[in-house]
Amino acid sequence: MAQQVYVLRALVQVAQNSDTEHLHWWWAMILVGAMMITSVTQSVAQHHCLKIGQRVGMKLRATVAMAVFDKVFSFCLCVHSLTH
């Protein structure tokens, strides 16, 4: 996100200095390309972090569920062995 701010600031400076003899269209195109690359990179990174978070959450939930199931199962075995 911070890179986009610097790129946008440079793009605004290029647009404000719109002298036709000093306007470097290729510099503006590089800045627009840099903005696109940084936004795509940010989107991919967010998606990747979301997937990692979901995976860790699923493993944590499965671990807790198995621990609870194991405790309930051992408690039920203990109760059945005491009643017979």
Image (cartoon, grey):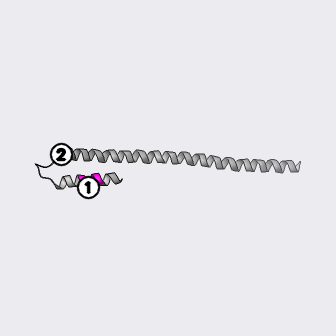
The residue nearer to you, when weighing 71 against 17, is 17
Compared across the picture, whether 39 is left or right of 84 comes to: left
Residue 11 x %, y % = 23, 52
**Magenta region, mostly helix, strand or loop?**
helix
Name the residue: 61% across, 49% down.
61
Residue at (56% x, 49% y) in the render: 57
Identify the mark nearer the N-term, 1 or 2. Answer: 1
Q: Position of residue 12 (x, y in %)?
A: 22, 55
The amino acid type found where label 2 is placed reads: Trp
Q: Where is residue 35 in the image (x, y as percent from the top left)?
A: 30, 48
Mark 1: give few (<14), some (14-19) or many (20+) Cα within 10 Å: few
Q: Is disc 2 surrounded by few (<14), some (14 to 19) or many (20+) residues within 10 Å?
A: few
- Residue at left offset 26%, top offset 47%: 32
Q: Quadrant of residue 29?
A: top left
Query: Does 75 sit left or right of 59 as displayed?
Result: right
Q: What element carries label 1?
A: helix
Give the alpha-carbon distance from disc 1 to disc 2, as whole Å: 16 Å
Q: Outermost residue, left direction?
A: 21
| Mark number displayed over residue 23 | none
Q: Circles 1 and 2: CB distance less than 8 Å?
A: no
Total labels: the figure holds 2
Taking the magenta stretch, the answer to whether it contains residue 9 is: yes
Q: Name which residue type carries label 1.
A: Arg
Residue drawn 53% across the image and 47% down it: 54
Q: Under tag 2, what secondary structure? A: helix
Q: Is residue 49 magenta?
A: no
* Range covered by the magenta-colored residues: 6-10
* Residue position marked by numbered label 2 in the rendering: 25
Q: Which disc number belongs to residue 9?
A: 1
Q: Is residue 55 left or right of residue 12?
A: right
